[in-house]
Image (spheres, rainbow, N blue to C red):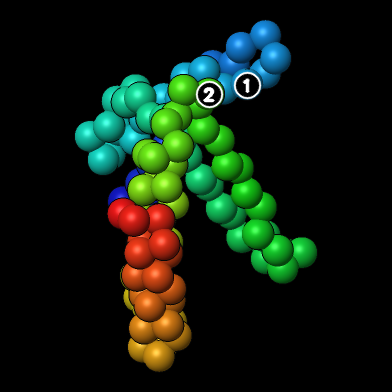
Amino acid sequence: MIGKHKSTISLTVELDDNRIPEKLNWTAVDGGIENEEAKAMMLSVWDSKTQETLRIDLWTKDMPVDEMKKFFHQTLVAMSETYKRATQDEKMTATMKDFCDYFAEKLEL
């Protein structure tokens, strides 16, 4: 019998003296990512026991606001696509995508 494959994704956060993120790096060897720098990250984990989402949202202090707006928009679009794959709910997916279009319009993206 072949053993199960395990994959590790790691995050490294460098903080300043006030514990504000200065640098974010991530590694996902199976995905070909090795110590890549990022300016922001959002991680959500579902806790089945408590029926709630646990989150880590971090961004570096030099993350430009215009890039943060794009990051949020692209994250919302990706979430709507993930929602569709996970639930097959076409109607709500369309509603979510409409909101993404509205969001982008209001931010002039």
The amino acid at mark 2 is: Lys
Q: Which residue is at 40% across, 70% downward?
A: 102
Q: Which residue is at 45% across, 37% downward?
A: 65
State which quadrant residue 30 falls in.
Answer: top left
Q: Position of residue 34 (x, y in %)?
A: 29, 25
Between marks 1 and 2 in the image, the one whose residue lies nearer the viewer: 2
Q: Secondary structure at mark 1?
A: loop
Front residue of this view, candidates 44 and 50: 44
| Disc with the residue nearer the chain's start (1 vs 2) | 1
On the image, numbered disc 1 is attached to which residue?
20
Q: CA distance from mark 1 to mark 2?
A: 7 Å
In this rendering, the answer to whether 70 lies above or below 87 is above
Q: Secondary structure at mark 2?
A: loop
Front residue of this view, candidates 87 and 81: 81
State which quadrant residue 49 falls in.
Answer: bottom right
Q: Is mark 1 in CB contact (under 8 Å) with mark 2?
A: yes
The amino acid at mark 1 is: Ile
Is 33 on the left-hand or right-hand side of 54?
A: left
In this rendering, the answer to whether 101 lies above or below 20 is below
Disc number at residue 61? 2
